[in-house]
Image (cartoon, rainbow, N blue to C red):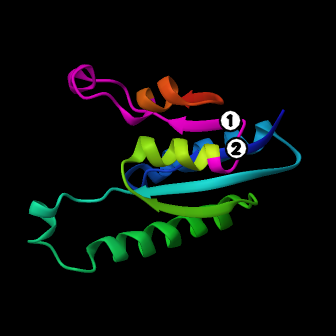
């Protein structure tokens, strides 16, 4: 069905990541590719000044290690990619750069804060140039 699928995984909800990579695998054409993505958010300078210098570097290393472990645990072939920045923007950029025809995103149950701030999944749906599957 799909040739290239981007699967962003939130490290704080790795169990949802396993569920959506399996779902993406079932939707993938023979010879297609899955890009497992983790986005490490950058911290504003006024916060980062009080934190260890290697905090972001460690988060990137940890994210990559967890995605590789997820890939191995599921036995699903995927490319692992780590980006840094605002999650929705980086997910959309990854999809565009890889010419993805589907993004599979795990979502949580919306709460009151989503009406003021907006969830990453909401932003991805509004701005994606390809199909988006939201998995609850």
Q: Which region of the structure is painted magenta?
A: 97-121
**127 lies left or right of 7:** left
Classify 24 as above or below 51. above
How many callouts does the rendering have? 2
Assign a secondary structure to mark 2.
strand
Q: Which quadrant does the N terminus fall into? A: top right
77 and 60: which is toward the camera: 60
Residue in the image at 18% along x and 57% along y: 44
Assign a secondary structure to mark 1.
strand
Q: Residues within 10 Å of mark 2 (few under 14, many from 20)?
A: many
Q: Position of residue 92 (x, y in %)?
A: 53, 41
Alpha carbon separation for disc pair 2 and 1? 5 Å
Residue in the image at 42% along x and 30% along y: 123
**Is residue 93 visible in this depiction of the protein?**
yes
Q: In terms of image quadrants, where is residue 96? A: top right
5 and 9: which is toward the camera: 5
Q: In terms of image quadrants, where is residue 45? A: bottom left
Q: Residue at label 1?
A: 102
Residue furthest toward the right? 30
Q: Earlier in the sequence, mark 2 or mark 1?
A: 2
Q: Position of residue 18 (x, y in %)?
A: 58, 50
Classify 130 as above or below 45. above
Q: Position of residue 131 (x, y in %)?
A: 66, 27
Q: Please say if the residues under marks 2 and 1 sit with CB atoms less than 8 Å apart.
A: yes
Residue in the image at 48% along x and 23% along y: 126
Residue in the image at 61% along x and 29% along y: 133
**Disc number at residue 134?**
none
**Disc number at residue 5?**
2
Q: Position of residue 127 (x, y in %)?
A: 50, 28
**132 lies left or right of 83:** right
């Amino acid at each position: 069905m799909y040739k290239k699928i981007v699967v962003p995984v939130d490290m704080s909800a790795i169990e949802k990541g396993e569920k959506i990579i399996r779902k993406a695998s079932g939707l993938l054409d023979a010879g297609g590719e899955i890009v497992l993505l983790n986005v490490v958010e950058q911290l504003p300078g006024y916060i980062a000044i009080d934190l260890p210098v290697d905090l972001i570097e460690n988060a990137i290393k940890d994210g990559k290690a967890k995605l590789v472990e997820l890939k191995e645990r599921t036995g699903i072939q995927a490319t692992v990619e780590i980006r840094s920045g605002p999650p929705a923007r980086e997910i959309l950029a990854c999809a565009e750069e890889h010419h993805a025809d589907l993004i599979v995103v795990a979502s949580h149950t919306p709460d009151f804060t989503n009406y003021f701030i907006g969830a990453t999944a909401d932003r991805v749906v509004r701005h994606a140039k390809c199909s988006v599957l939201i998995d609850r």
